[in-house]
Image: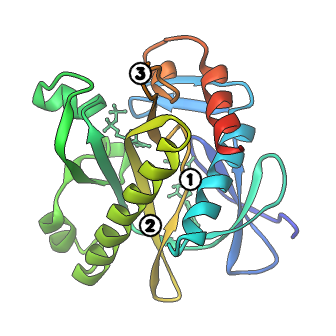
Amino acid sequence: MEKRDKIYEGKAKILYTTDDPNLIIQYFKDDATAFNAAKRGTIAQKGVMNNQISTKIFEFLKEEGIPTHYEKTLSDREMLVKKVDIVPVEVIIRNVAAGSLCRSLGIEEGKELSCSILEFCYKEDKLNDPLINEYHIRALGLATDEEVETIKKYTFKINELMTRFFNSLNIDLIDFKLEFGRFEGQIILADEISPDTCRLWESGTGRKLDKDRFRKDLGNIEEAYQEVLNRVSK
Ligand code: ADP
Ligand code: UDP
């Protein structure tokens, strides 16, 4: 599959067209950003590791019946995916309190939540991806009610599947972000799932194996991503 024109360069990936109008290539970069790009850096080999980690997770979810954009991993940094019309809403699931939930509600990091929390954020960097709810989505026409129902159904299912998947690797899935898109009229899972988009804590020790090592300058960032890759590759 030939890479053709660059169509978009984001913070972590570059998108290229291919000779098939329905397929694009996601190229994973080493660039890392946090706090809406206020903090920037690079994590050596991150793109390579995230491409492989995302591949494993998308393959697993596909096997479990979740419709996804994933087609094929082409190289170290390149993944062939279906070109979707991205729903401009980031979908977050939280199983344990961390990050912005702690900051906004004054909750201690690590507090168990008695049920998982689903959040929506409007995907608009200029506005800092503000938290919204289903009424905002309807009022602004970001997605139809039916699409929102489908997205919620898939998200809770994915949470169940990924929690089980990571638990079997001795990792606790604390929270994560998903993006969905429209392909031939259907909602499918898109973007990536990696330590950039999930909080992953080693079971028992609580050792952070995700982008919080970069956000909080905890050191050993590459080692943490590599550890996740080693475990998902088993
Ligand atoms: P950002 O845009 O937030 O800086 P990235 O650097 O990860 O993020 O860029 C990847 C972009 O590609 C994101 O905007 C994401 O919504 C979009 N995207 C992900 N999967 C697909 C897909 N299958 N088709 C079209 N766009 C996609
Ligand atoms: N997340 C993400 N992209 C975003 C915002 C959040 O992948 O633009 C992920 C983040 O890695 C974490 C979860 O979503 O796993 C919840 O993020 P939170 O709102 O706590 O983000 P913070 O403000 O702490 O980065």
Position of 71 relative to 122 (above/below):
below
Q: Position of residue 49 (x, y in %)?
A: 70, 38
Please name the residue that numbered disc 2 is placed on. 180
Task: Give the distance between the C-alpha atoms of the residues marked 1 and 2, in whole angstroms.
Answer: 10 Å
The residue pinned by badge 3 equals 206
* Residue hosting label 1: 192
Q: Mark 1, residues whose alpha carbon is within 10 Å: few (<14), some, or many (≥20)?
A: many
Q: Residue at x 16, y 59 (%)?
A: 133
* In-front residue for pair 177/137: 177
Q: Which residue lies at the image location 68% right of the left edge and 80% below the top edge?
A: 22
Crowding at dot 3, Cα within 10 Å, few <14 / some 14-19 / many 20+, comes out as few
Query: Which of the two discs, 3 and 1, labels the residue nearer the N terminus?
Result: 1
Furthest-right residue in this view? 2
- Tell me how the rendering is colored: rainbow
Disc 1 under 8 Å from ligand 1? The reply is yes
Label 3 to label 1: alpha-carbon separation: 24 Å
Crowding at dot 2, Cα within 10 Å, few <14 / some 14-19 / many 20+, comes out as: many
The answer as to whether callout 2 falls within 8 Å of ligand 1 is: no
